[in-house]
């Protein structure tokens, strides 16, 4: 579905241009309080960023530095499909200990199912794993990001695997969707489920989407 991919790319370009515009304002000398509030609101509305509890007590210079730190990051627009029971991760808003929050793609193995609140959130999840990702890899000065700076090495997790019929526990390093992109800015967009046609077992080939017309 070329239209869906174009739509995701258009969304990325639109938000990325806004990020670049605001970053240039933050670099400028004729900065105003009105502009500062606009940038804060943009960060919340478009990027779903929550600020730490201390942010309001920051000086203007400290707020500017914090906003530059948050906005000058790689950007990804992720196509998400409605959850129809396929195994895998999904989109969540993750809150950190300092009160900040950001959009993350979380694998099911990362959810503490012994915690009733976390288990309920996971069970009520409405959408599933990225189908398509469109990524912005350059900053507002046209320079490539060092993507190693945006990895969260703490987001490794233990998953259940099988080998030769035996169940195993595997320690997985931060995956592409989660830890390797943990410090990216993220936008989730719902796309039609028809764009997602996985083949994880032989039986999946019997689905209508994999039949010759």
Image: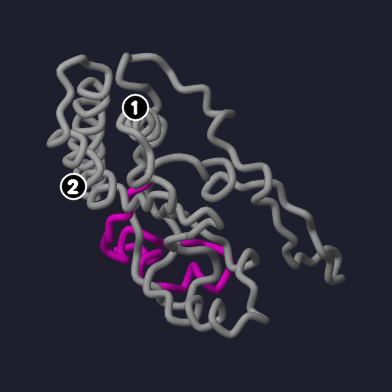
Rounded to the nearest whole Å, what is the CA distance between mark 1 and mark 2? Answer: 43 Å
Res. 77 image quadrant = top left
Query: To which residue does mark 2 refer?
Result: 3
Please tell me whether mark 1 or mark 2 is closer to you in this view. 1
> Quarter holding the C terminus?
bottom left
In the figure, is residue 198 to the left or right of 135? right
Q: Residue at x 32, y 54 (%)?
A: 188
Q: Position of residue 201 (x, y in %)?
A: 59, 68
Query: To which residue does mark 1 refer?
Result: 61
Question: The magenta stretch spans which residues?
Answer: 186-213
Q: Position of residue 200 (x, y in %)?
A: 57, 64
Q: Position of residue 91 (x, y in %)?
A: 43, 61
* Residue 11 against residue 120 in the figure, above or below: above
Is residue 14 visible in the rendered image? The answer is: yes
* Residue 14 against residue 51 in the figure, above or below: above
User: Element type at marker 2?
Assistant: helix
* Residue 123 against residue 4 in the figure, above or below: below
Q: Residue at x 40, y 73 (%)?
A: 83
Is residue 73 visible in the rendered image? The answer is: no
Asked whether the residues under the numbered discs 1 and 2 touch, taking CB atoms below 8 Å apart as contact, a structural biologist would say no
Q: Residue at x 32, y 53 (%)?
A: 48
């Amino acid at each position: 579905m070329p239209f869906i991919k174009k739509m995701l790319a258009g969304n990325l370009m639109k938000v990325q241009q806004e990020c670049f515009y605001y970053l240039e304002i933050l670099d400028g000398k004729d900065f105003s309080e009105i502009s500062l509030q606009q940038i804060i609101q943009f960060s919340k509305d478009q990027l779903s960023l929550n600020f730490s509890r201390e942010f309001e007590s920051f000086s203007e210079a400290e707020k500017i530095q914090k906003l530059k730190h948050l906005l000058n990051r790689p950007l990804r627009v992720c196509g998400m499909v409605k959850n129809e029971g396929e195994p895998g991760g999904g989109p969540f808003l993750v809150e950190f200990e300092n009160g900040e929050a950001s959009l993350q793609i979380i694998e099911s193995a990362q959810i503490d199912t012994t915690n009733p609140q976390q288990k309920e959130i996971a069970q009520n999840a409405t959408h599933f794993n990225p189908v398509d990702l469109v990524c912005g890899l350059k900053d507002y000065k046209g320079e490539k990001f060092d993507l190693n700076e945006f990895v969260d090495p703490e987001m490794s997790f233990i998953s259940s695997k099988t080998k030769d019929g035996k169940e195993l526990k595997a320690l997985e390093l931060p995956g592409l969707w989660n830890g390797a992109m943990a410090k990216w800015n993220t936008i989730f967009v719902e796309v039609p489920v028809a764009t997602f046609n996985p083949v994880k077992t032989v039986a999946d080939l019997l689905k209508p989407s994999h039949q010759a017309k």
